[in-house]
C-alpha cells in the first residue's frame, strides 16, 4: 500500500480516523504529484514538503491510454501518502458529478472525456478513501504560490497564476480557496482588444464562437507569437529582445493583468510558462498595465514602479511550477489536521491550518458573473 507503516512503540490512531492507510506519525509525509500537460506529463515524489522533490519523470502527451499507463507504471513501486493531479482542461471538479476527474471538452485530439483520476486510482489499486486531490494545472500552482507567500510571512489574501505556452490559463486563489464555481476559471479565453495595427487574419484559432472578438489565447500563445514573428515555435527562443513580437505579447498580457486587477483585485499576479521565460516581457507588461489602467486604481501596488514590480512577478519555480502545484494539491488532499494523529510523546500543539477547508461557491459565482461582463466589454472594445 502506498503509505507509511506505523513504527514500533507508536500508538494507534484514534478511532475517529477511519483509515490507518492515511495516517502519518513520526515520519515525514511523502507526496506524489502528477502534472498533466498538453505537451508533456510530469510525475514526482516529494518528501516532507511539496517543494522537496526527490524523484521525477517526464512523459510526452500521446494518447490517454499510453501516458496514463506510463504514469501508473512509474508510481507503482513508490511509496506515498497522498496524490495530487493538476490537469489541463477543461476538467470536471465537482465530486458528485459522474465525470468527476475527467478532462472534458478539450479540443486536444483524443483527450475529450478522458478519465484521469479513475484511471490512476484503478491502475494503482488505491482504496476509495485514499486521498487524491484533483484540480486544474493553473489553480494548483496558484495555490502553491499563495501558500509559499503566506509561509514567508506575507499577509496577502489573494493570488492569480497565469501560464502562457501552448495555451493560456489563469488560476485564482482567494482567502486560501481555489476558485471553482460553475466549473473553474478559463481566463485564457477572455476577450481583449487587438494590438494596434493587428488584423483579424493574424489570429490563428478559436475555442469560442467569437468571430468579432480577440480571444486572448489565440493572440499570445506560443503558436500565435511564432506566427507573428514568422518563425517556428522552437525558434522563438532565438529572437532578440527588441523583436516586435515581444511588444505584441506584452500588450495582450497587460490586458489580461488589467482585467484581473479590475475584476479580482489580486495582491499578486504570477506569470509563468514557456513564453514568460523571456525576462524582457516583465518590464514591458508592467509599463503597459500602468498605461492601460490610466491611474484609475490609485494604490502604490499599481501606480509605483516598485509596487507594480512586486505585483506582477515571475514564478520562483520557473517551468517547475506545475508539478510543485500538483504536490501542493497532494498536501491538501492529505488534509493533515484530520489525518495526522498526535504521537504520545509529542508536545501538544495547535492544529495546523488548512488552505482549503470549505467551498467558496457564492463568491466564485459572483466573480464568474463579473468575468462574463468583462468579456462583453472586451468584445465591444475590439469590435
Image (spheres, rainbow, N blue to C red):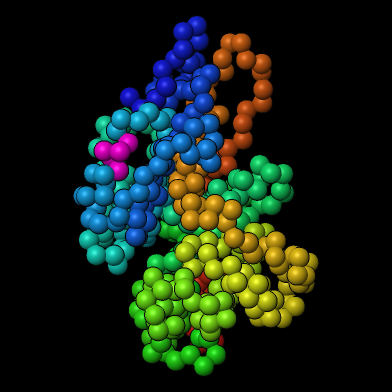
Residue 165 image offset from top left, x and y in percent: 44, 66
Q: Main secondary structure of the magenta part?
A: helix
Q: Nearer the viewer, residue 314 or 179?
A: 314
Left or right of 34, for residue 154: right
How far across and down, in percent of the image, does residue 80 sit? Answer: 40, 30
Left or right placement of residue 187 versus residue 127 in this view: right
Q: Residue 291 location in percent, x, y?
A: 69, 81
**Tally of numbered discs:** 0
Q: Residue at x 73, y 72 (%)?
A: 297
Q: Residue at x 53, y 31 (%)?
A: 48
Q: Which residues are magenta?
A: 71-75
- Which residue is situated farthest in the top direction here? 9
**Which of these two is toward me, 217 or 93?**
217
Q: Nearer the viewer, residue 18 or 51?
A: 51
Q: Position of residue 210 (x, y in %)?
A: 39, 81
Q: Is residue 228 visible?
A: yes
Q: Residue at x 43, y 26 (%)?
A: 22
Q: Is residue 36 left or right of residue 189?
A: left
The residue at 59%/67% (across/down) is: 279
Amino acid at each position: 500500500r502506498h503509505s507509511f507503516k506505523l513504527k514500533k512503540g507508536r500508538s494507534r490512531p484514534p478511532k475517529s480516523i477511519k483509515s490507518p492507510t492515511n495516517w502519518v506519525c513520526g515520519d515525514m509525509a511523502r507526496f506524489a504529484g502528477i502534472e498533466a500537460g498538453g505537451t508533456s506529463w510530469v510525475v514526482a515524489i516529494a518528501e516532507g514538503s511539496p517543494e522537496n522533490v526527490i524523484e521525477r519523470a517526464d512523459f510526452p502527451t500521446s494518447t490517454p491510454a499510453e501516458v496514463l499507463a506510463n504514469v501508473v507504471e512509474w508510481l507503482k513501486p513508490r511509496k506515498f501518502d497522498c496524490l495530487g493531479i493538476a490537469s489541463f482542461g477543461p476538467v470536471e471538479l465537482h465530486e458528485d458529478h459522474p465525470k468527476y476527474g475527467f478532462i472534458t471538452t478539450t479540443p486536444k485530439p483524443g483527450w475529450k472525456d478522458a478519465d484521469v483520476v479513475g484511471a490512476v486510482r484503478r491502475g494503482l489499486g488505491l482504496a476509495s478513501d485514499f486521498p487524491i486531490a484533483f484540480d486544474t494545472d493553473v489553480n494548483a500552482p496558484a495555490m502553491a504560490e499563495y501558500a509559499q507567500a503566506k509561509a514567508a510571512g506575507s499577509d496577502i489574501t489573494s493570488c492569480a497564476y497565469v501560464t502562457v505556452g501552448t495555451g493560456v490559463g489563469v488560476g485564482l486563489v482567494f482567502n486560501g480557496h481555489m476558485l471553482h464555481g460553475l466549473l473553474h476559471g478559463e481566463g485564457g479565453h477572455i476577450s481583449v482588444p487587438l494590438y494596434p495595427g493587428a488584423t483579424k487574419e493574424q489570429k490563428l484559432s478559436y475555442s469560442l464562437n467569437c468571430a468579432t472578438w480577440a480571444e486572448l489565447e489565440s493572440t499570445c500563445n506560443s503558436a500565435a507569437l511564432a506566427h507573428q514573428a514568422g518563425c517556428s515555435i522552437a525558434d522563438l527562443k532565438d529572437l532578440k529582445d527588441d523583436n516586435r513580437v515581444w511588444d505584441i505579447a506584452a500588450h495582450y498580457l497587460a490586458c489580461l493583468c488589467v482585467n484581473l486587477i479590475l475584476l479580482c483585485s489580486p495582491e499578486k499576479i504570477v506569470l509563468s510558462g514557456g513564453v514568460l521565460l523571456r525576462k524582457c516581457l516583465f518590464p514591458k507588461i508592467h509599463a503597459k498595465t500602468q498605461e492601460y489602467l490610466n491611474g484609475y486604481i490609485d494604490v502604490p501596488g499599481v501606480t509605483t514602479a516598485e509596487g507594480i514590480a512586486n505585483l506582477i512577478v515571475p514564478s520562483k519555480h520557473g517551468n517547475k511550477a506545475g508539478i510543485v502545484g500538483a504536490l501542493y494539491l497532494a498536501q491538501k488532499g492529505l488534509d493533515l489536521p484530520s489525518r495526522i494523529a498526535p504521537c504520545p510523546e509529542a508536545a501538544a500543539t495547535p492544529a495546523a491550518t488548512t488552505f482549503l477547508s470549505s467551498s467558496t461557491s457564492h463568491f466564485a459565482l459572483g466573480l464568474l458573473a463579473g468575468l462574463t461582463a468583462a468579456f462583453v466589454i472586451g468584445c465591444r472594445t475590439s469590435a
